[in-house]
Amino acid sequence: MGKERMLVTGGHSLEGQVRVSGGKNTAVAVIPATLLSDEPCTIENLPDIEDVHALADILAELGAKVDYEPGRLMRIDPRPAEGISISYHNAQRLRASYYLLGSLLGRCGHAKIPTPGGCEIGTRPVDQHLKGFRAIGAEAGEIGGMLTAEGELTGGDVFFDMVTVGGTVNVMLAAAKAKGNTTIYNAAKEPHIVDLANFLNSMGARIKGAGTDIIRIRGVQYLHGSTYAVIPDQIETGTLMIAAAATGGDVIISGCIPTHMEALSAKLLEMGVKVTDSDDAIRVHVVGPRRAINVKTQVYPGFPTDLQQPMSALLTTAKGTSIVTETIFEQRFRHLDEIRRMGAHVRVMGRTAIIEGVSELYSAPMTATDLRAGAALIIASLMARGTSEIYEPGFIDRGYEHIEDKLRSLGAEIRREALL
Ligand code: EPZ
C-alpha cells in the first residue's frame, strides 16, 4: 500500500452509538495458541486489523491451513504446520510475533524467531520471557537477531521480576502441554490473560488463577479443537470513550465490558465527564467543563499505559494543570511533541508530562510514531480548530478496526487520502 495521510477537521461533537471490535491484544495471543491444538480451531470476533492479517500470514508460513474471513473469523488447522521459524519480514510486522516462540516451543519443543518489530515505545527487552522458558525446562537465548528456545518441557516455578503481559502469555503457551506443572508468580492480570486462559481451557488445558498474581498450569498431552470468540477490545473502548469526552459529545459504546474500563471511567468522572455503565455498554456524556487530573499508568487494574497517550491528548484542553506519569514504557510521550505543534502547553521531564490545559488547539500536520500515539493525534485533531493532517496512519491500522468509519458514524469529519 502507498503512503497515505488522514485528514481530521475538528470541532464536531460526537454523538450516537458505536460498537467495539474484538480485542487486538487478546487476538494476537489466541491465534498463536491455536498451534498447540491437535485439532482444527475457529476463532471468532477477530478485529480486522493489520496485526491479525500478519498472524494469518505467519500461521500459513508455518504450514498451517488458514481460512480467514477478515473482520469475522479465522479457521485454523494446525496439523500440517511443520515450521519452527518465521521470516524476518513477518516477524517485524508485529510485536506479538514473539508469541510464536512460546507456542512453537510448546508444540514441538523447538522455535527460532527473529526478534520482533512492533511499536517503538521503549527498549522492550525479552529477558523475562527467556527466563520463564528456562524455568520450565528449555534452553533459551537471543543471538544474531534471533530468539531461540528448545527443550523437553518439564514445567516449573516462574518468578517474574516485573509484571509482564508478554512474558506471562509466552510462558502460558509453552507450559500448557509441558510434561509437568508450572506456577507463574507475579503474573500479569490483564483481561487478555484471562481470555487466553479461557481459550486454552476450552481446548482442554488446565489453567487456574488467570486474572490473579499466581497462575497454575497443569500440563496436558492433548488439546482438542475449539470455537472461541475473543473478548472486546479494552483499549478501543477507552479510545472511543476519550474521543467522546474530548469533543463534548454524548456517545454509547456498545459491545464492551464495562468492568474492564473502571480505571478510565474513574478518571473521566474525576474530570467532570458523566460515565454510565450498563451490562455491555458505556455512555460517555459531557455536561460541563473538563477539569485537569493526574494520571499514573499501572499494570491492570490500574490505568493502562495504552490509554495514556489518548488521555494525555484529552488533558491538553482540560481546565488546569495535569500531571501524567508513565511507569511502564520510557518513550511513550512522543505524541506530545506533535500535539505541542497544535498549541498545547506541555513539558516532558523523563517519565512525567506536565500539561497545562489551553482553551483551544489549532490544526497542524503531524506524524504518528506508534499505534496509540496515532490515536492520540486523532483525539487532539477532533478537538482542534481547522483540518489536521496525520501522516503514517498505517500505525493506527495495526490496532484499530475501521477507525475512520466508526468516528464518522458518530459525526466526526475524518477521511484518508493517498499521497502522490
Ligand atoms: C503488552 O506489551 C501489550 N502488547 C502492550 O500493548 C501494552 O502496552 C503492554 O503489554 C503493557 O500493558 C501486547 O499485548 C501485544 P510488558 P508487552 O511485557 O507484553 C518490561 C498496544 O499499544 N519488560 O507487560 O511488550 C517492559 O520493558 C501495545 O496495544 C522487561 O523488562 O509489555 C516494560 O517496561 C503496545 N523484560 C514492562 O516490562 C521482559 O522480558 C511491561 O512490559 C518483558 C517486559
Image (cartoon, rainbow, N blue to C red):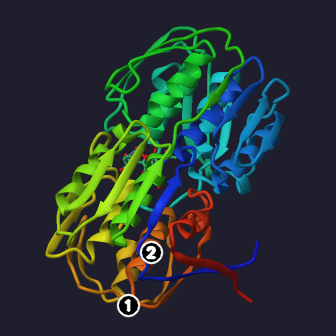
x and y, in percent, of residue 360 in the image: 29, 87
Tag 2: amino acid: Leu
Q: Nearer the viewer, mark 1 or mark 2?
A: 1
Give the left or right position of residue 264, taking residue 385 as reference: left
Residues packed near mark 1 inside 10 Å, few (<14), some (14 to 19) or many (20 plus): some
On residue 380, which mark appears?
A: none
Tag 1: amino acid: Tyr
Q: Residue at x 45, y 28 (%)?
A: 194
Q: Going from the N terminus, do you reach mark 1 or mark 2 first? A: 1
Image quadrant in which the C terminus is located: bottom right
Q: Secondary structure at mark 2?
A: helix
Residue 363 in view (yes/no): yes
On residue 377, which mark appears?
A: 2
Q: Residue at x 68, y 21 (%)?
A: 226
Q: Residue at x 34, y 45 (%)?
A: 261
Give the left or right position of residue 187, taking residue 225 as reference: left
Give the answer, above or below, for where 378 lies relative to 236.
below
x and y, in percent, of residue 195 in the image: 50, 30
Residue 122 in view (yes/no): no
**Marks 1 and 2, how far apart at CA:** 12 Å
Give the left or right position of residue 339, taking residue 230 as reference: left
x and y, in percent, of residue 324 in the image: 22, 64
The quadrant holding residue 205 is top right
- Give the residue number, with chain letter if any, for mark 1: 362
